[in-house]
Image: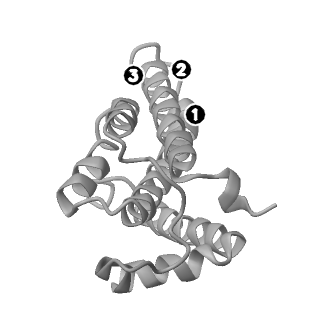
Amino acid sequence: MNTTDTWTPRRLFRTVAIAEAITWTLLILGMLGKYVFDLGGLGVRIGGGLHGFVFLLYLVVAVVVGINQRWSAVLLLITLATSILPFATIPMDRWLEKRGRLDGDWRRTAGDDPADAGAADRMLRTLLAHPGRMALIGLIAVAVVFAALLVVGPPGSRA
């Protein structure tokens, strides 16, 4: 079975949008544990780490789905911005679905539309031809950025 047959743009986006909201919950609970209940920072380290990874994954998935669905740059930027506000990815998913912006399958072949000739569309079709590789490349890219951010540390930690 081809993974692009089961992981439609809607299903992939929704799954990651929900995961991003769940990890917001874990991070907020960890912060409550640390700063309100004085339970130490383990909850923040775990919740923050998971949230950071899924946050980056959401950004990658939003770009891939946005290219596939031919979202405007403004819509893509708004979608990316929802990852910054706690739980905003869920209403964004619902908004996109109500307007049909998540409808359809992956665009694996070039059509007659001149928009299919763009570099982003060609790259997406190449990656969609090998969905396993696409998932691996996406996860590796997120892991590399995540690791780099861990090395740099949180804002203000290099004072």
Q: Which residue lies under the disc numbered 1?
A: 42
* Labelled disc at residue 39: 2
Q: How many marks?
A: 3
Q: Amino acid at mark 2?
A: Leu
Q: Amino acid at mark 3?
A: Tyr
Q: Amino acid at mark 1?
A: Leu
Give neighbour class at mark 2: few <14, some 14-19, many 20+ (Cα, 10 Å): few
Query: Residue at point 72% right, 60% down?
Result: 3
Query: Which residue is at the far top?
Result: 37
Instruction: Verify CB contact (< 8 Å) between mark 2 and mark 1.
Output: yes
Q: Which residue lies under the disc numbered 3?
A: 35
Instruction: Verify CB contact (< 8 Å) between mark 2 and mark 3.
Output: no
Instruction: Verify CB contact (< 8 Å) between mark 3 and mark 1.
Output: no
Query: Residue at point 56% right, 68% down?
Result: 138
Viewer-closest of 141 and 130: 130
Query: Residue at point 40% right, 65% down?
Result: 152
Residue 64 place in picture, x, y as percent: 45, 64
Q: Is residue 139 above or below residue 154?
A: below
